[in-house]
Image (spheres, grey):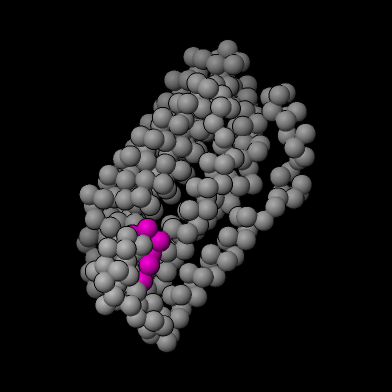
Amino acid sequence: MFAAFVVLLREGFEASLLVAIVLAYLTRIGRWKERRQVWFGVGAALVVSIVLGGVLFATARELSGPAEKLFEACALLLAVGFLTYMVLWMRRESRTISGSIRREVDSAVKRGSGFALALLVFVMVLREGVETGLFVFGISRASTPLQTAIGATAGVLAAVALGYAVYALGKSINLGAFFRYTGAFIIVVAAGLLAQGIVNLQLAGLVPAFLYPLWDVSEMPVLGATGGLGQFLGILVGWDPRPDLLEFCAWFLYLLIVGYLFFRPQTTQEVGQTPRSARAAEQGA
């Protein structure tokens, strides 16, 4: 439930933040009537995201045996790819994203195309929606539907509240700290999803197990499969009390490589401009 809450908070807030930037800028340039196109884009993206999520869950229910495990593995690995891209993209773009969005809004407004503005918002929100659907599917494999629903609902409500706060209060919220801490947590969650994906590939008979089990604490009262802490860690970070070498190596190497890419200092080339020029671009937008 906590994992669903944090990731839905992050994903929902990211989408809310992008929409808030568009709405605030349209108001600033006196094009407040164009906000209707923004909500058209948001609504269309939400509908498409829900439909795609429904198709994902419905397809999984229709499968069984190795085919089901292969489908789940593909969905989990795709979720890991989306989450990894999202975390690293926001790390790179968070300092200049407001100016980039404003330039795209300017381009759409100058063309006088309400469709272009709606499409811009649609693409931004749909990306977050697809990532969210894939993650919810992955986390639901190790959690109950009720736990996932409670965590997801709480995360979405908190994300909307934060998005409104940014829209109403400007830069009163430390966005850098928010994306840094939630990004670190998502990396840990994604590593667990990757490990689960490897297990499903093994259950589908496509990947052999190596040195299985690497350790076995499944009978321990705390960390075992039926232990409270073991179940919690399984839902939260994909803990497996009986992992094999391949599963553990995939989990460990993902944390090592993606963690390094996320926490290493950004260079001027990665940012695309110096902090001073970034502030100037923001002020001039």
Q: Camera-side residue: 233 or 157?
A: 233
Residue positioned 64% across, 47% down in the render: 92
**Residue 237: within the magenta?**
yes
Q: Does 1 sit left or right of 14 as displayed?
A: left
Q: Is residue 69 above or below residue 261?
A: below
Q: Does 6 sit left or right of 99 as displayed?
A: left
Q: Is residue 137 above or below residue 115?
A: below
Residue 99 position in % (x across, y down): 65, 31
Residue 119 position in % (x across, y down): 49, 33
Q: Is residue 113 above or below residue 216?
A: above
The residue most toward the bottom is 211
**Residue 37: within the magenta?**
no
Residue 168 position in % (x across, y down): 50, 21
Q: Camera-side residue: 52 or 20?
A: 20
Q: Is residue 83 above or below residue 214?
A: above
Numbered range of the magenta stretch: 235-240
Residue positioned 62% across, 55% down in the render: 263
Q: Note whether residue 47 is visible.
A: yes
Residue positioned 42% across, 36% down in the render: 159
User: Which quarter shows the C terminus?
Assistant: top right
